[in-house]
Image (tube, grey):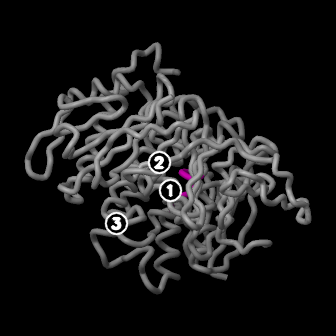
Amino acid sequence: MVTEPVGLSNNLPIKRVMPARVGDTDIAVWRSASGVVSAWLNRCPHRGMRLSHGFVRGESLACLYHGWQYGCDNKCKYIPAHPALEPPTTIQTMAYTVVEKHGVLWVSLDGTPEIPALFEKLQPVRSISFNCSNEDVLSALAETTLTCDDGQVLSASDMQSQNILILDNPQNKPKLAVLFQKSSAANVTAHLLADNSWSIDGLIRISRWCELVRRRAEIKIPDNRRNL
Amino acid sequence: MSFKLYNYVLSGNCYKVRLFAGVLGINYDSIAVDFHPGQEHKSDDLMQLNPAGTLPIMIADDLVLTETSAMLIWMASKFDSDNTWWPATDAAKTAAIVQWLGFSSDLTSTIGEARLHTMLNRDVKIEKALADGIVALRRIEAQLTEQGLRGGAWLVGESPTIADIACFPYVALAPDAGLEHDDYPAIRNWLYAIRSLSGFVTMPGIHEVHELRNEGD
């Protein structure tokens, strides 16, 4: 299975947890006080509560429901209702492979992370979710252009590989990278990264451009799919 | 006491006032109104006080206030000696804040309505309320994203204002209506920042930041 980008690193500070999806799988991604990132099935082994509603205690993630705490090794460390009990090591969360690279959090469900050969020195811009398919987004992208600070006009015709759209020029020095995280036929999230040529106003222009793309892409949804 | 508040615990609009009072550290008289199922806000007594038949109602000095934006401005003007929550002499900031105070009523009429439908079985055009609620969440997400690119964490300027207080409740309560925060990373970070404010108070559906409590509390 392809390794999916599930979020931008700067949207997951230390001692925080966030929800994410890889295909049909609901995931909780969290960062401990010392910075260790984990990605787990978003389900407390105790009563099934979404762990993304939980909270980080040092090097553990606690479930909001009954406070069961799980460490970075996925094992249950503490059960508040039985404070003297050392939890059996068989109580553990379902863990996936998570890698942090290029300012992006990547998750693989089958344990083999394949991070695309990206590029150094790109900065995170934003993540944005679309209520339409990847194809709808790509076709909307093809109809729009984005003007760089230096006046260069980017269009989507340049290059496309796997789930990555690179605007400007091939591999070496992209100005903008769009990473697609596909959840379903009716839902896709894009993570945007930009090189250091963009001013703050330029980054804001990128943010508004992807909203324009979303307006176009979602209009393309036929009425019979709109209610999905 | 500083003011009197006719109050309903599950109301996001009443919560704006309770939250801001908590953050400013001021005490007030709270009068519980049986909004549901009693419909007490439509009773003769309260309709005489507030012909609009809405909650909250604030008795502030000689004023009877029924719009939360007016209440927040009054509270900030009266009790925020640093003038950061409502920087009255800064034309650009106050204008920008009023933009978001206006927008906050869009949140009430979309997410707030959808929530009334989901929680209290109100007769609401739920599909439209939810679709418009997503539009409203996306507007907040876009603004917070742009503020983040500028290095800020709040809706207006570099510090929290009554714009954040006014927009917070129904964004935070969106999951009550079935609109989760999963697709909105900037909103999640902003909710966390507001919940981390000194003096923050909770309501059903909006809990405290457990991470900030001491172990064993």
Q: Amino acid at mark 1?
A: Leu
Image-based side of A58 in relation to A13, left or right: right
- Spatial separation of the CA atoms under disc 1 and disc 2: 9 Å
In the image shown, does A136 or B157 lie closer to the viewer? A136
Q: Position of residue B208 (x, y in %)?
A: 67, 64
Q: Which mark is residue B151?
A: 3
The quarter holding residue B151 reads: bottom left
Specify the subunit that label 3 lies on: B
Q: Position of residue A216 (x, y in %)?
A: 30, 29
Residue B115 in sight from this viewpoint: no
Specify the subunit that label 2 lies on: A
SS at badge 1:
loop
In this rendering, is residue A34 above or below A116? below
Q: Amino acid at mark 2?
A: Leu
Q: Amino acid at mark 3?
A: Gly
Other-residue count near label 2 (Cα within 10 Å), few / some / many at <14 / 14–19 / ≥20: many
Other-residue count near label 3 (Cα within 10 Å), few / some / many at <14 / 14–19 / ≥20: few
Residue B187 in sight from this viewpoint: yes
- Spatial separation of the CA atoms under disc 2 and disc 3: 22 Å
* Residue beneath disc 2: A105
Which residue is found at the position 58% from the left and 69% from the top?
B196
In this rendering, is residue A76 above or below B125? below
State which region is magenta.
B166-172
In the image shown, does A38 or B175 lie closer to the viewer? A38
Image-based side of A171 in relation to B93, left or right: left
- Spatial separation of the CA atoms under disc 3 and disc 1: 16 Å
Which residue is found at the position 41% from the left and 50% from the top?
A101
* Residue beneath disc 1: A12
Q: Please check whether the numbered discs 1 and 2 fall on a single chain.
A: yes
